[in-house]
Image (cartoon, rainbow, N blue to C red):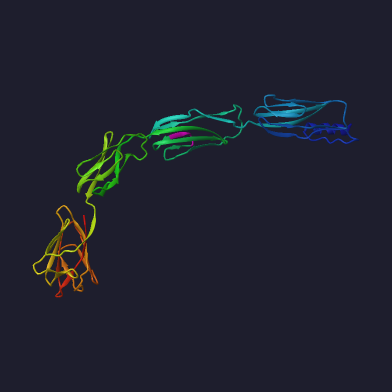
Amino acid sequence: MAAVAAAFASCSKKEEIVGTNDKPGFFLNRTQLALNKGTSESLTATITPKGAGTVTWSTSDASVVTVEDGLVTAVGGGEAVVSASYGSQTLTCDVQVSALVTTVTLNEHDVDFDKGDTRELTYVIGPEDVNVPLTVTWTSTDESVLTVDEEGVVTAVGGGQASVVVSVNGVTDVCEFFSHCYPTGVVITPATAQVNVNKTLQFEAALLPEDCTEELAFEWSVEDPTLASVDANGLVKGLAAGDTHVIVKAGEFSASADLNVKREVKTVEVRPNSVNYTSGEITFTFSSGCYYFSTRYGMEIPNGQSFTISVPDDYQIDAVTFTPTYGQNGDFTVDKGNYTRDGGKHSWEATEATSSVTFTRATSQEADILVFTITYE
């Protein structure tokens, strides 16, 4: 009798009673159980030796767990006690049920607002009996458009589309935002450009600020349409040499770019055979001491004599090169630009816009020049 009493005392303390063939016992395989809501787990009650009675199962709170033939099912968050009774003996198992977050619902899912505005988002989690600690994070899919703080306050910092995501214990919901940014101006690129006659150059226009979300039609024009033309897409074509402006308008806003239209750069070879010689737009004028020697040697320029190369006033000379057929080791002086000599090759480059340049023989040795190469526009 003393042994049986001791066994019953152990049951009340939720300790296993181990039975043997020669010593009866009744025990549960678990005294504590942790479940997530919606899951189940079996408890096993053992009687040794097997008796004639049956085990009766019960729960202290059917809103937390139910039990049938030892199968414990978690139906709600909280705590309950599952009991197994056999005859006058009762064993218990404490059950802790965690109701996890399964849904998160934001108060808004589609928001239009303006750059600079704020909007506070809130959320509701489910089910109602959630009883676990919450970890909440807020994120923006594009922080150049939206920022969001740890309280769910969304700020439009730029124009465009982005989303805010709330995560509660890994369960998420999303709100789509469109932040309107209205134009404050228009910009044209390039701001300064050159184009040759009969050549084209593409201009681009964009609304300001860069994150502007609204659209305005661009209207293109040229201040002096005799110098250049422009199509509806900003493609400019040079028509005649001169300076003008390319203009773009967008609603109430406008911008302009400086445009220089140049004649096409040409490089030609000229073989003058007289003291006054013209080839196309290029004219040679030799001083009185110069003369044409032959088809082999060309024009002869003695010491102190000069020649002038010129183009019409609305053209300009960019460069001149020549190599004397005789007397190449002497220099020339030039009235403007940058003159150099490398061995027998004489080179000149303009340092400012000019329609004429004069070369003067600077040594006693004569120079015979057959071919001049001239770059002009």
Q: Is residue 95 visible?
A: yes
Residue furthest top as drawn: 62
Q: Nearer the viewer, residue 93 or 350?
A: 350
- 374 versus 20 height, above or below: below
Find residue 136 and report its horizontal and vertical position in percent: 54, 36
**Which quadrant is home to the C terminus?**
bottom left
Q: Nearer the viewer, residue 252 or 20?
A: 252
- Mostly what secondary structure, the magenta segment? loop
Q: Is residue 65 left or right of residue 235?
A: right
Boundaries of the magenta span: 150-154
Picture quarter containing residue 23?
Answer: top right
Q: Is residue 128 left or right of residue 185?
A: right
Find residue 17 and report its horizontal and vertical position in percent: 82, 35
Find residue 238 and report its horizontal and vertical position in percent: 24, 46
**Which quadrant is home to the N terminus?**
top right
Residue found at x 40% / y 34%: 179
Asked whether 153 falls inside the magenta stretch, the response is yes
- 258 versus 59 height, above or below: below
